[in-house]
Image (cartoon, coloured by chain):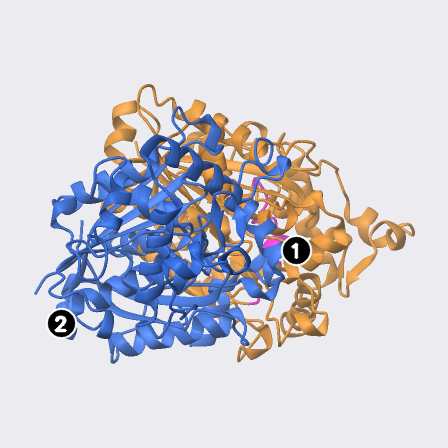
Chain colours: A blue, B orange
Amino acid sequence: MREVAIIGAGMTKFGRSEIGLIELMSEASIRALDDASLGDLRVDAVYVPNMGAARLNRQTAIASALVDRLNLFPAMAEAVENGPASGASAVKNGFQAIASGMADLVLVTGGERMRAVNNLEATDFVASLSHPQAEYIYGVTLPALAGMFTRLYMERYGVTARHLALVAVKNHANALDNPYAHIQQRITLEGILTAPEAVVNNPYIADPLRLYDCCPVSDGAASLVLASREIAEKLGRPVVRIAGIGQATDTHAVHERPDPTELTAVRLAAQKAFGMAGITPQDIDVAELHDAFTILEIAESEEAGFFRKGEGHVAVEEGVTSRTGTLPINPSGGLKAKGHPVGATGVAQLVELTWQLRGEAGERQVEGAKSAFACNFGGFGNNVVATVLRRED
Amino acid sequence: MREVAIIGAGMTKFGRSEIGLIELMSEASIRALDDASLGDLRVDAVYVPNMGAARLNRQTAIASALVDRLNLFPAMAEAVENGPASGASAVKNGFQAIASGMADLVLVTGGERMRAVNNLEATDFVASLSHPQAEYIYGVTLPALAGMFTRLYMERYGVTARHLALVAVKNHANALDNPYAHIQQRITLEGILTAPEAVVNNPYIADPLRLYDCCPVSDGAASLVLASREIAEKLGRPVVRIAGIGQATDTHAVHERPDPTELTAVRLAAQKAFGMAGITPQDIDVAELHDAFTILEIAESEEAGFFRKGEGHVAVEEGVTSRTGTLPINPSGGLKAKGHPVGATGVAQLVELTWQLRGEAGERQVEGAKSAFACNFGGFGNNVVATVLRRED
């Protein structure tokens, strides 16, 4: 298997966009391509993770549209959809294109323009990833699934509303140093939990989850340029190697799992990614986890092997996962504050980690980071992609 | 690069389905898996080519849904979208998963349930692959693009309505021997061209294209099991090797091409596929071309290198492309008569060719076929995937 490196990274500011999906993806792509400084080399293949263009933007075959916009003919191109894990799924396929020898240079650009529709329609759209007969038909949305999951987690492991809020406070603080973040608003425990106005400012979305436990609905795009290691070294780019990729599926309907608090697909995907990279969770310096809801950062940090089951919330409380802790999680602000344009998210996690491993993360830099981990969580944990990156030069 | 073989093939009957998309894909998958006879071996990865589930069926993350339905946990899984070329794009990605060493056994199941909506909505949906600002906004549909393309082709190369009708008559005749074909209706030149009732029975859709020049709107699914060559040989399956894959993109808007009658992406994709396979068009015994409109079978047969430019219609007239000719094209009935559930089409072409290379195509068998070619045509030729298969044992 040929080795694969990330040699370019770029993204748009997440938030509410006035420009179209292809334009957003084009902007992110140009930033990543500029960053890669390819000179005369041409991109062989383009992967476009996206979940909702056909429905939200009434456009299909968007990979061809992006190739056209960027004048990358005759590059191979297709869109990849794996719900909110579309981004890392596409990176996996770009990795395989190079690892197999079918391509040498690959552009992966994920994007979503979710705010083209109203929030009710966006919520219904995201719910279309749930089980049609066992979940969707009963009105179960993603916040609802996360709410029930959180309740079980609280009862089982002693997680409280305060622990959840600590995740939000941490990630909002990180996002203040991320110019690409959707939400740049300092919040405090008092402001979202105990102040009288918290009842209004932080209403319940799906009890026990409140507004500040949930990621926003965002527009945005993120892009990576992948290359064979030989090309990366020839170009003289810092080598951020894709050292491990793991992916695993689980039951579609959450209630079919023997223990719904166990995110088996996260555990299996992480084990596979670490196994392929030949390192352990203890070797990781920085991680981006899929905190679409605050509880997920806690649960994923356990299933990935960073903390024992039921102890993730303690790590948050002790500051282990803050930027100056021993395992900073979501220095970008995470989905919680950076935003969650679903097709872009998995790519954006790896954009952030590439910058971290290159020492280019500015105010939010995790000092001396050499190994990084990302968890991109699809469905309600029914399809998870874990990626391990390493700086090697 | 590890060698990859097709060891299982199956599909549903194309047409109007009473069952849902996941059920259709499940049926095709089970047939392909039964055919592969994996015993204790497990599928590592699942690829699901599909274009419209989010919009036509209000369901996303369908790859996870299919894994769940088939109990293939914890296989990796994602959907792949490349317009009407989604099928062959997904096969390419399954190929790369095995060729790279990331997987040993891959299921590729494409499906579409287009008749869940009415024909107007289906036509609008397919048109969403055209250029939003340069084509779609002016009301240009795929039949309209094909109509203008046909007119140019007629003026340039002397193609007549009779040549087009000959393609339809041939493919309808082939479909009569294909139990999976959507349309099983014998047609004659007289019946669709010269009889008085032809004006009513074969109305103009997009002048000069008439009803019998256009593929139907179909529901259906098709499935392949891919394996590393070692596993294929261990299982004792007939080895149909994926010998070459080529993919190329072209301008999104058709009018931006220097000569709109040239399908550059078909030519480049075919050249690449033949180059990888180490054979020439003259070595091909049977081909499945993407005849969404009759003119496309003629044009693709030229660009792929089977006939000189402007001579494809002569080959049809001379019977070269009929089942007993020297290069049978679309023995399955093609999109024209077998049907065109867009996400399934590219996979279904390779299902037919697998059967042909194994000598399992029944009444429509092309005798002694050892090498086969497929052209899966995305957009109006802006993203084309060509595949070369070879029987090797």
In percent of the image, x 14 and y 64: which residue is there? A230
Q: x, y (%) of residue A326? A: 14, 54
Left or right of A201: which side holds B104? Answer: left
Q: What predominant SS class does the magenta segment belong to?
A: loop
Left or right of A248: which side holds A390? Answer: left
Magenta span: B310-324
> What amino acid is at disc 1?
Thr
**Which residue is nearer to you in this view: A289 or A158?**
A158
Q: What is the crowding at mark 1: few (fewer than 14 residues within 10 Å), some, or many (at least 20)?
A: many
The residue most toward the top is B39
| Residue at disc 1, secondary structure | helix
Left or right of B275: which side holds B28? Answer: right
Q: x, y (%) of residue A351? A: 29, 65
| Residue at disc 2, secondary structure | helix
Q: Which chain carries label 2?
A: A
Can residue B367 be seen here?
Answer: no
Q: Name the residue under label 1.
A: B294
Q: Relative to A64, does residue B200 appear above or below in the rendering?
A: above
Q: On the image, which quarter does residue A152 sit in?
A: top left
Q: Dividing the image into 4 quarters, which one contains the C terminus of chain B?
A: top left
Q: Which chain carries label 1?
A: B
In percent of the image, x 50 and y 70: which residue is there? A22
Q: Name the residue under label 2.
A: A234
Q: On the image, which quarter does residue B372 sit in?
A: top left
